Image (cartoon, rainbow, N blue to C red):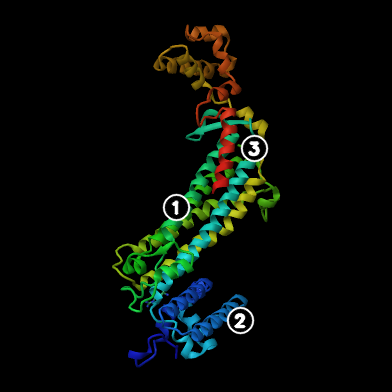
Amino acid sequence: APVSLWGGRFTGAPADALAALSKSTHFDWRLAPHDIAGSRAHARVLHAAGLLDDATLEAMLDALERLRQDVASGAFVPAEDDEDVHTALERGLIERAGADVGGRLRAGRSRNDQVATLFRMYLREHARVVAGLVLDVVDALVAQAREHLGVAMPGRTHLQHAQPVLLSHHLLAHAWALLRDVDRLRDWDARAAVSPYGSGALAGSSLGLDPEAVAADLGFTGAVENSIDGTASRDFVAEFSFVCAMTAVDVSRLAEEVVLWATKEFSFVTLDDAYSTGSSIMPQKKNPDVAELARGKAGRLVGDLAGLLTTLKGLPLAYNRDLQEDKEPVFDAVDTLEVLLPAFSGMVATLVFNTDRLAALAPQGFSLATDIAEWLVRQGVPFRVAHEVAGACVRVCEVRGIELWDLSDDDLAAVSEHLTPGVREVLSVEGSLASRSGQGGTAPVRVAEQLERVVAAVGRA
Ligand code: ARG
């Protein structure tokens, strides 16, 4: 029969079906290193409170260290009968230290405060890993932006040609979004850095333990203010999961652009062979699978978040076993990002841009019409009139099948007396780009400054 933690008031063992339902070692085992670190800290506060003598503390720490090594080497793994990571490790401790020493560690703690603490430790560790991987994507964007400073491309709204922009400006727009995701992880960490240890099952501990000491020992900034909140709250999981989902959604928007850019019709980029796939039947194919998987996995991370929030909705205080369902979705989010982001940054770093084509398309689709209107405004023409006049230029061009810069001085004058030949200074991509020189604009000087600001932000992150 399974060894259980609650023998006293039970006469029989749990049904096999219950044990099968209850079991979580197949997914919570990854918390084992944090559980052992937590046990070490807990042993020390028990000792500080006079509940373990020096020799017992030493024997316990020694057994925990041997257990840590055996977990790391794979010599100790959960047994069929172990319910969760905490049960398995208590068995491992008792096997190494004996029941008298090993059986003392559970005093003053519950799996409820234990799991809430370990989960925070695990997520804080992975928040750093994920942030590093997001910054690798930002680095790849910065390198591409730096290499292509000065290259124009069609800027789009509604996916239609809108105004010329610099390719670097466009790439850095993605970089800023990703930097905010890294910022979110940092903000989250400040809230998550509070230790629930000492909350016990829900009401706190009567044993004179010092939760602040455990918190400091485990790298937290302090202990929770409320033991019910400490054991029952999982907003730290949902918030972390939101940041993961937001990151994947941000990545998916660039991914979708890469999918479009790699088509025959766009021909804006060529994917490196190392980051594209072929077809088993069509010999000519080169597919953007990395970008497609990024797009697809964003949906999966949104699902992870929705699942978590649904588990939490309406859940009464304090701990309920439903909360065991908090782990798989966020582990999935972490695992997904940790496998996706390295491939994605590699793909971005190795994109080859067809700069001639990007530059040639930049002014097409009458994307300089706004420049005519704004030039007129600078000549003192009211914008409503300027917009009409520029629109009339487009109409003439459309009818004659020509571009705006093909209009002769006479053509321009025929459209409006305000359209003197001076308007030609903005009827080029260079003129248009240079004119957008306000803060945040696409003028080459502004984008060059912006690039250095992104680099500085990466340095601070
Ligand atoms: N494995 C549980 C979880 O992940 C922790 C154990 C708490 N179980 C209990 N019956 N109080 O949430």
Q: Which residue is mark 1?
A: 187
Front residue of this view, candidates 288 and 402:
288
> Up-down: is 101 above or below 285?
below
Q: Amino acid at mark 1?
A: Asp
Disc 3 packing (10 Å; few <14; some 14–19; many ≥20):
some
Residue 49 numbered tag: none
Instruction: Please name the residue that numbered disc 2 is placed on.
Output: 75
Q: Taking 459 as reference, is 15 left or right?
A: left
Label 3: state its secondary structure. helix
Which residue, given by chain and number where applicable, does mark 3 sit on? 146
Question: Distance of mark 3 from mark 2, alpha carbons?
Answer: 50 Å
Among the 4 quarters of the image, the one containing residue 425:
top right
Q: Quadrant of the N terminus?
A: bottom left
Instruction: Please report the residue visible at 54 percent of the width from the left and 43 percent of the height from the top.
Output: 457
Q: Residues within 10 Å of mark 2 (few under 14, many from 20)?
A: few
The crowding category of the residue bearing disc 1, from other C-alpha atoms within 10 Å (few below 14, some 14 to 19, many at least 20), is few
Q: How many numbered marks are there?
A: 3
**Label located before the other in sequence (1 or 2):** 2
Q: Is residue 3 above or below residue 132?
A: below
